[in-house]
Image: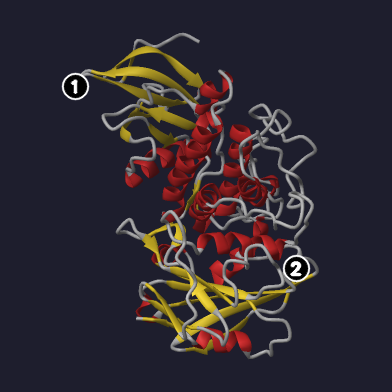
Amino acid sequence: MTSPEWIGPYRIERLLGTGSFATVWLGHDPVLDSPVAIKVLAENWHHDLRVRERFLDEARLLRRLDDERLVRVHAAGELADGRPYSVMAWADGGSLHERLAAGPMPAPAALDLLAEIAAGVAVLHRHGVVHRDLTPGNVLFRSGPDGERVLIADLGLAKALAAASGLTARAGTPGYMAPEQDDPFAVVDTRADVYGLGRLGLRLLGRDAERVPDGQPPPGGQTHPGRAIRLREGVSPQVAAVLRRATASRPADRHPDAEAFRAALRHATTTPAPAPPADRPAGRRRFGAGWLGVVALVAAGATAGDAAPAARDVGTWTSGPVTVVLPPGWRATGTGWAGRYGDDGRLEPALVMSPDPHRWAADPTVPGAFVGLSASIAARTTPAGFVAERAHAACVAAPVRHTRQAGVDWVVARFTCDQGRPEVVEAAGFAPGHVGLIYAQVVPPAGAGPGFVDTLLAGVRVR
């Protein structure tokens, strides 16, 4: 390929890369005296009006969003032969594809990077846009005065959610493309990008069998919910669970969007795995999915300090603006929701209550409940949406019901399980004044009547 000397007013220095739809050159902006990346539509697509319009849509979209987590577009133009081009900020740190080619990065750095990638994709999702092609080549790095920044690039396949169905061309890269993207009649939404994030996570953290070459399908086909995720030593089982859910074949089994994926990943990396009971050898006890969900929330109920406060046997317990009435014989502990922070940088309020709060995480025969209030969850989803995220795959779900208790319209889902906790109830509602989403996970006592959960929810107050 012959390098042009100029594209518009920009002097061309060298080729940065080529793709199916475009070529990217490193240029120099004489006015700003700085390097720029110039993306030019490929010659073979010059006369395809659909591809040409998609190329321009990418530049318009990036210009409109103008976010520090996305590649920024400075200008656009047209060559003498009619091909459009866009002028973008140059990512001087190269791509994730290039870095992975040099070898795996340390697991802690890979986890931090995956969270940053998810934050960039979350920007798109908040604006109703699906990327559709999340690959290591589309994750770029740019240096700056405050350190290196991760950028999401190449939105040429992105599309507004309102028009996300009916795409007739295959859109995506094998190995990172969600299964539904192979179906021309499927509706492709934010969960397709969650699949891509999960595959990026396996590329960053998986053992050799999981780290498939870019552009190749995963071994044995797509990842299924029950499939074991093989990660490198030192990566927790909680992270494996997040990636397994993200790469589920059915969109309904994945996290709803990039922000939910990022929150789950952050929770998995900040919550320690529960220790096995002292009277049983480690690794011998098996639990169902309902039990695992309860364990995660118990760990989240502790404070952020060196140790959780002692459980107190009182009629009520208060955590921030949340006050609960304790069932007879129950105690409470905890003042913050670990891993979940408000705009003030402090932990959002949460607590655990049970006849024995400290045994609840280790003994499935002990009933209890987790209650938390989150403004950040309320900003991204509804009570019904959040309850849907809390599905227990190995349990049988009863029909979702609604109940109004203490001024809160609760969405309630009940699960019965063959292993671990025999019954788990997930409930959520907007707190009065919409100050946040109030969430409760309840494990009723054995033999408790049908009114136990509603009585407990009636005792939850938010001031």
The residue beneath circle 2 is 395
Dot 2: within a 10 Å radius of its alpha carbon, few (fewer than 14), some, or many (20 or more) residues?
A: many
Secondary-structure class at tag 2: strand
Identify the residue shown where x is 52% and y is 39%.
Answer: 111
- Indicate the quadrant where residue 330 lies: bottom right
Toward which corner of the image does residue 250 lie, by quadrant? bottom right
Tag 1 and tag 2, C-beta contact below 8 Å: no
Picture quadrant of residue 4: top left
Q: For marks 1 and 2, give the one nearer the viewer.
A: 2
The alpha-carbon separation of the residues under discs 1 and 2 comes to 63 Å
Residue 109, given in percent of the width and then of the height, sits at 49, 33
SS under mark 1: loop
Residue at 66%, 62% (x, y): give it.
Answer: 362
The tag earlier along the polypeptide, 1 or 2, is 1
How many numbered markers are drawn?
2
In the figure, is residue 351 to the left or right of 29? right
Residue 440 in picture, x, y percent from top left: 54, 74
Q: Residue 203, relative to residue 328: is it above or below?
A: above
Instruction: Identify the residue under disc 1.
Output: 31
Residue 258 visible (yes or no): yes
Within-10-Å neighbours for mark 1: few <14, some 14–19, many 20+:
few
The amino acid type of the residue labelled 1 equals Val
Residue, x 52% and y 60% (percent of image)? 300
In the image, farthest residue toward the front = 279
- Which residue does the image show at 77% across and 34% down from the upper left? 219
